[in-house]
Image (cartoon, rainbow, N blue to C red):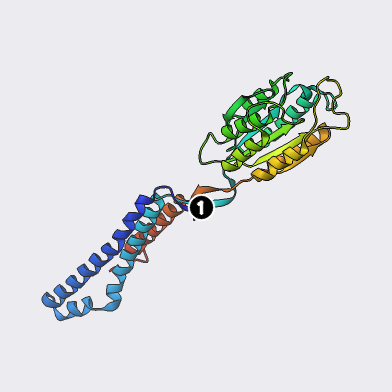
Amino acid sequence: MTGFAEPFWLVGLAGIPVLYLLYRRAVRERSYAALTFSRVAVAAQARDPDRLRRPHTLFALALLALALILVGLADPQIPLEGMDEGVSVVLVLDTSGSMQATDYQPTRLEAAKAAAGILLSRLNPDDYAGIVIFESGATSAAYLSPDRDRVIERLYSIRGRDGSTALGDGLALGVDMADSIPNRHRVVILLSDGAGNAGTFSAEEAAAYARERSVPVYTVGIGSANPLAGTSEHAALDEETLRAIARTTGGKYYAAVDEGTLAAVYAGLTDEIPREPKDTSIRDVFFVGALAVLLLEMYLRYGRGRILP
């Protein structure tokens, strides 16, 4: 058990020993009264241990039911295996001029969008997703949202640009977006085909910022043996920088050499996203237990197996 959503109800448990002590006091006073005012036979019956034990059992069951109800009202939470906490996933996508190269079919950018769509479609229902794009600067293409269909729609509407590669700006904005919803696990997935050569933040500064915010960054390098086919843009894949970003932030680096391996990388990233078991309420278990105890108490009191005369 990891905690209680409404712990103030647990204060009521302190009253249970008080109720028990008051009950014991009342029983003793009743026994003394019986000895003083009743006939000898009645007094002997009042002092019979078996007879006195019977109402004790019923009262103990009532106290147990009360304790179960109070714990249930406190809403106990436990992490259940197979039920995961939602994660904020931000895709940071390079849209610079070199992403128009046709060594990936139909282009690098379109292949990256198709692969990212696979990842988005495989996220869990409680996950949030968002998209940041960058070239000479960085901007949000889809704000962090649980509406994955909307995010996928915005993904496929992204168009390439002719600018340079502001990799650090894109990563910094992605970290800000991932961190915009508190108390959730966050992850950034960064794809680029070139070295950072523009923008305000360097890749090293953005990686340090991600580490400071405890946001792991998974980096994907896109390139091939004929990296500039179909475009006059020049790009040199800086794998060392992408590896360093992943290493600094606690993520991983992946290299994609064609559209097939790129799709496989993004599909596999779904399983790499760090998750924690989701705290799940088990208060109904305590309420059902309290009901069962009360039914048993009523049966012992009024049913065929009653323990009172």
Q: Is residue 63 above or below residue 224?
A: below
| Residue 123 position in % (x across, y down) | 65, 37
User: Is residue 307 something one can see in this rendering?
Assistant: no
The amino acid on which the numbered mark 1 sits, given as a three-letter code, is Ile
User: Is residue 242 something one can see in this rendering?
Assistant: yes
Total marks shown come to 1
Query: Within 10 angstroms of label 1, few (less than 14), some, or many (20 or more) residues?
Result: some
Nearest the viewer among 129 and 29 is 129
SS for callout 1: strand
Q: Residue at x 57, y 42 (%)?
A: 212
232 sits to left or right of 278: right
Q: Quadrant of the C terminus?
A: bottom left
Nearest the viewer among 304 and 149 is 149
Q: Which residue is mark 1?
A: 78
151 sits to left or right of 47: right
Nearest the viewer among 46 and 64 is 64
Q: Is residue 307 above or below residue 183?
A: below
Q: Residue at x 67, y 35 (%)?
A: 203
| Residue 296 position in % (x across, y down) | 39, 61
Q: Quadrant of residue 148?
A: top right
Nearest the viewer among 222 and 285 is 222
The residue lying furthest to the right in this view is: 225
| Residue 138 position in % (x across, y down) | 64, 25
Q: Residue at x 76, y 25 (%)?
A: 109
Q: Quadrant of residue 150?
A: top right
63 sits to left or right of 177: left
| Residue 179 position in % (x across, y down) | 55, 36
